[in-house]
Image (spheres, rainbow, N blue to C red):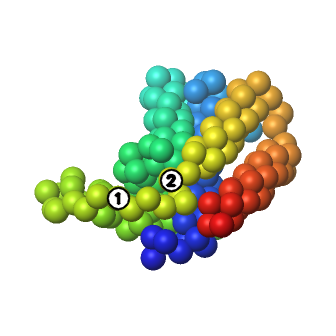
């Protein structure tokens, strides 16, 4: 399975997607701004809006969550440190998933649930190396296309674009952000596949 190209690409872009979403969501917290456009202080105490307002008003804790998401997302996007990123992402995603179940969030639990399942999938993908954490025998990793430096470069480009866009643009356009990320991802895919074909010749 590790040698199947389409599975390697699926894993690479799953890391980009989850990591990018974390980086995108982290900057608003690091900047000390609300996740929502308006204050939820006057909403009922058992609503998600009031919950987010309470976290926002905590100040340091709100920013701490942001830095945690930023760091975990960055590690995942680097590809090189993606295993550590998947480990750090798991408790964060579990926490978010339970929050979305505890309050009304419409279809958000489905989205977060899929992210959680995808992150668990990343664990299974790297189980051969991660199982050493449980004192289980470890086999040397197989050299695959997934480990090519091109994916590390693309991951860094996606991270830097997301980071600076969210840092300096107050009125962000999610469609613009997704479009640029998509273009970077497609360029990386084309370049990576060309390199792969040359190596196979």
Q: Nearer the viewer, residue 5 or 169?
A: 5
At a point 74% along the width and 54% down the height, the residue shown is 191
At a point 38% along the width and 68% down the height, the residue shown is 124
Residue 163's x, y, as percent?
A: 67, 32
Residue 159's x, y, as percent?
A: 64, 38
Q: Is residue 143 visible?
A: yes
At a point 32% along the width and 64% down the height, the residue shown is 127
Q: Are marks 1 and 2 in contact (CB under 8 Å)?
A: yes
Q: Nearer the viewer, residue 8 or 101?
A: 8
Mark sitting earlier along the chain (1/2) = 1
Write down the quadrant of residue 121 in the picture: bottom left
158 left or right of 45 in image: right
Secondary structure state at the residue bearing disc 1: loop
Image height of 192 relative to 168, above or below: below
153 left or right of 120 in image: right
Q: Mark 2 highlights which residue? A: 147
Residue 141 numbered mark, or none: 1
Q: Distance from label 1 to label 2 (Cα)?
A: 10 Å
Residue 19's x, y, as percent?
A: 57, 48
At a point 49% along the width and 71% down the height, the residue shown is 3
Q: Is residue 96 visible?
A: no
Secondary structure state at the residue bearing disc 2: helix
Image height of 25 relative to 4, above or below: above
Q: Quadrant of the N terminus?
A: bottom left
């Amino acid at each position: 399975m590790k040698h199947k190209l389409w599975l390697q690409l699926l894993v690479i872009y799953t890391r980009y997607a989850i990591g990018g979403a974390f980086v995108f969501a982290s900057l608003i917290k690091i900047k000390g701004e609300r996740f929502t456009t308006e204050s939820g202080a006057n909403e009922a105490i058992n609503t998600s809006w009031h919950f987010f307002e309470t976290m926002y008003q905590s100040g340091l804790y709100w920013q701490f969550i942001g830095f945690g998401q930023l760091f975990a997302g960055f590690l995942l996007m680097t590809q090189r440190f993606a295993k550590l990123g998947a480990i750090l992402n798991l408790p964060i995603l579990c926490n978010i998933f339970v929050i979305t179940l505890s309050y009304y969030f419409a279809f958000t639990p489905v989205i977060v649930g899929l992210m959680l399942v995808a992150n668990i999938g990343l664990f299974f993908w790297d189980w051969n190396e991660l199982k050493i954490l449980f004192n289980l025998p470890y086999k040397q990793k197989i050299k695959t296309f997934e480990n090519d430096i091109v994916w590390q470069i693309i991951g860094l480009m996606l991270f830097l674009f997301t980071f600076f866009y969210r840092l300096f643009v107050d009125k962000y356009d999610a469609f613009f952000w997704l479009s640029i990320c998509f273009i970077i991802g497609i360029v990386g895919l084309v370049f990576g596949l060309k390199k792969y074909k040359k190596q196979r010749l």
